[in-house]
Image: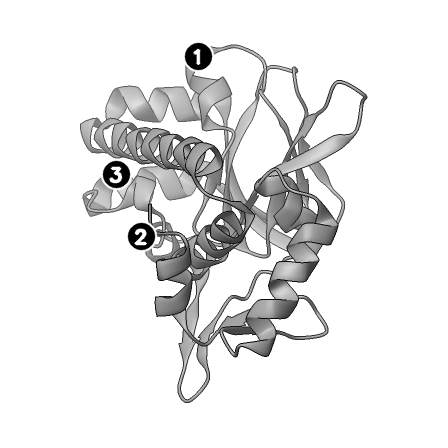
Amino acid sequence: MIDTIDTAELKDFQLFSDLPDHELQIFAGIIRRTTVPAGTLLITAPVPGDAVYFIVEGSVKVQLASENGVELTIALLGPGEMVGEMSLVNGHGRSANVITREETTLVWMERKAFLRALELSRGLSRNLVRELSMRLQAANERLQALGTLDVTGRVARQVLELAERYGKPVPGQGIHIPLPVTQGELAEMIAATRERVNQIMVRLKRAGVLSVDPASRIVVHRPDVLADLCRL
């Protein structure tokens, strides 16, 4: 199902933050909302992009194909995240595949409309530059972690990053990460084996640092311990 959205919903996304109401009204008129099932292929590499997506509910995984053809998860994205913007800006093919991990609600804008919006709104262009700069910084930090931290530190850092981006405080429990995260996905994101990640997660659970429910959703009880483990 495809539906329109209102300006209040746009304000939940960093790209549209602090924009004047008259601009938000224009953008709301050209942005659409849709809900798709798990396993939907939103973006395919190296096909040039024709839309930019914003996640309202649910989550997606960003995957690259390895040399032997196996798809490797390099990132998980949840509510508030934007995907597909780079291909729209530079006109080149996508750099990765993006697939929904669960039923996911998205709002999206076609390429021509997105480029026109950037021309019309200095605020939107400024917000996009800020978003891309933050992503570049985050990518550099991940590369630094891969090169300097051991596997335990990389596990701690990845869980802590997910908690900081998507976590919801639960009184008396800790920080609940609503995105389901399998040990296989976690292993792929930090360049480790699933077996090694399993060993580390078991140790962290026994120490009371975190817990994992049957749906693979993590609750962080001791973020301070995770921070110590991944401190460079």
Residue at 44% x, 65% y is 167
The mark nearer the N terminus, 1 or 2, is: 2
Image-based side of 125 in relation to 96, left or right: left
- Callout 2, which amino acid? Lys
Q: How crowded is mark 1: few (under 14 residues within 10 Å), some or many (20 or more)?
A: few
x then y, percent, for residue 179: 58, 60
Residue matched to label 2 = 11
Height in image: 101 above or below 72?
A: below
Image-based side of 49 in relation to 157, left or right: right
- Callout 1, which amino acid? Asn
Residue at 39% x, 20% y is 115
- Determine whether the residue tagged by mark 3 lies in a helix, strand or loop: helix
Residue at 39% x, 55% y is 9
Circles 2 and 3 in contact, beta carbons < 8 Å: no
x then y, percent, for residue 99: 68, 40
Tell us which disc is closer to us: 3 or 1.
1
Tell us which disc is closer to us: 1 or 2.
1
- Callout 3, which amino acid? Glu
Q: Residues within 10 Å of mark 2 (few under 14, many from 20)?
A: some
Q: What residue occupies the far bottom of the structure in this picture?
A: 172
Image-based side of 46 in relation to 227, left or right: right
Which of the 4 image quarters holds residue 201? bottom right
| Whether residue 103 can be seen here | no
Residue placed most toward the observer, 164 or 4:
164
Tell us which disc is closer to us: 2 or 3.
2
Quadrant holding the C terminus: top left
Q: Residue 23 carries which label?
A: 3
Residue at 65% x, 16% y is 47
- Determine whether the residue tagged by mark 1 lies in a helix, strand or loop: helix
- Determine whether the residue tagged by mark 2 lies in a helix, strand or loop: loop
Residue placed most toward the observer, 151 or 50:
151
Residue matched to label 1 = 90
